[in-house]
Amino acid sequence: MVTYKVPVIAGDGIGPEVIAEGKKVLEVVAEMDGFNIEWIEYPFGAENYLSTGELISEDAPEELKNYKSIYLGALGDPRVEPGILELGILLKLRFYFDEYVNLRPVKLYEGVPTPLKNKKPSDIQFTVIRENTEDFYIGLGSNIKKGKSKHKLDLIRDIYHIRFGLDIDSDADEIAYQLGVISREGARRVIEYAFNYAKSHGKSKVTGVDKANVLTYVYGLWRRVFNEVAKNYSNIKSEFAFVDATAMWFVKNPEWYEVLVTPNLFGDILTDLGAMIQGGLGVAPGGNINPKGTSMFEPIHGSAPKYKGMNKVNPVATILAGCLLLEDLGLEKSANKVEKATEEILREGKVKTYDLGGNSKTSEVGDAIAKKVKELTI
Ligand code: IPM
Ligand code: MN
């Protein structure tokens, strides 16, 4: 029997609870389809950071590189300053493994309420492919004239204070800047991925999102590359859309979209909106993908610390992230089974968590989906 070794970073808050359900469902499908999954647990997250001072152990990235797909819960904890865990673990791994594709399917399943009036499942079925390693996420920038450092402004302030008894607030002069970078190759590879994705998933159109009317340098390049790549796919229509207009159309006419490809930051924002129209963060999965390397699959929601340990939140996003993970391992048939089972449970609507208007527990949803996987005849 084949054994797939899958590293797991359950993480913080509700991460461990939703990951437990994802593992449960994946183990059931593995048993049915005749393969094994061996989970390799990594403790990274707040608890580990607070007790060891380490975000990721030194050897971990090299070690994780030996695996194809990682299963990730959520990161973030109120005891740790915002950004430390997110940047030090999640973004660190996205960059380390060069996971340049962030795949975020937006799909409204039957039985799941959408806040959009008069929209039905067939209207909300598209995929956002978010660039995942460039743009404003590269962390290049600085604060100038900040805080207590002795620079010219501080001296002036001291002089004013001593000579004239006047206090001036040098922080008022503070400046911050941060650079967004798009590289030709970085744009090409993700845009090409989007067109290939459209082709292999029977989609007929790719929308390139940008803001080339204002951020002319970075997104001007993005747009030129989009055009160049589009030329190689004569059977797939292509169009541009500005990000602000795209946000409007997600609400007004989501049925317009099939596949969208977007720079990193716009994709981050648009996919939270996407998650809302597909029924909320509880049902929205994502994949950080390096097609030739190590990828990482996670629910797109955060660690929701206030619900930690309550067995209350929706595990569906994590279970669907598990489907993406199975696909990444080349186990399409099993992925399809897990999606079908999830879809049925959502449609039946008998077992659902609070966010979908029910009162089932996290583990009950996992149990119901696992049971459904067993009953499926596909
Ligand atoms: C996401 C998250 C992350 C991001 C944060 C937690 C760093 O919002 O996966 O969408 O901005 O990419
Ligand atoms: Mn986000």
Image (cartoon, grey):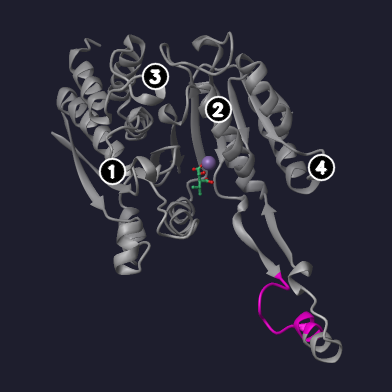
Vertical position of residue 303 compared to residue 247: above or below: below
Q: Is residue 369 left or right of residue 285?
A: left
What SS does tag 2 mark?
Answer: helix
Residue 237 in sight from this viewpoint: no
Q: For the residue marked with disc 2, what is the amino acid? A: Gly
Residue that carries the numbered disc 1 in the rendered image: 16
Q: For the residue marked with disc 1, what is the amino acid? A: Pro
- Looking at the image, do the residues carrying marks 2 and 3 touch, with CB atoms under 8 Å apart? no
- Residue depicted at x 30% and y 36%: 18
Q: Nearer the viewer, mark 2 or mark 3?
A: 3
**Residue 119 belongs to magenta span:** no
Vertical position of residue 163 compared to residue 127: above or below: below
Residue that carries the numbered disc 2 in the rendered image: 274
Q: CA distance from mark 1 to mark 2?
A: 25 Å
Q: CA distance from mark 4 to mark 1?
A: 42 Å
N-terminal-most mark, 1 or 2? 1
Of 62 and 121, the residue lying toward us: 121
Of 358 and 60, the residue lying toward us: 358
Q: Nearer the viewer, mark 4 or mark 2?
A: 2
N-terminal-most mark, 2 or 3? 2
Residue that carries the numbered disc 4 in the rendered image: 214
Vertical position of residue 283 compared to residue 252: above or below: below
Vertical position of residue 140 compared to residue 225: above or below: below
Q: Nearer the viewer, mark 1 or mark 3?
A: 3
What SS does tag 4 mark?
Answer: loop
Few, some or many C-alpha atoms within 10 Å of disc 4 (few <14, some 14-19, many ≥20)?
few
Q: CA distance from mark 2 to mark 3?
A: 20 Å
User: What segment carries the magenta color?
Assistant: 144-157
User: Which quarter of the rendered picture does the N terminus lie within?
Assistant: top left
N-terminal-most mark, 4 or 3? 4
N-terminal-most mark, 1 or 3? 1
Can you give x and y, in whole percent of width and height, for residue 324 in the image? 38, 31
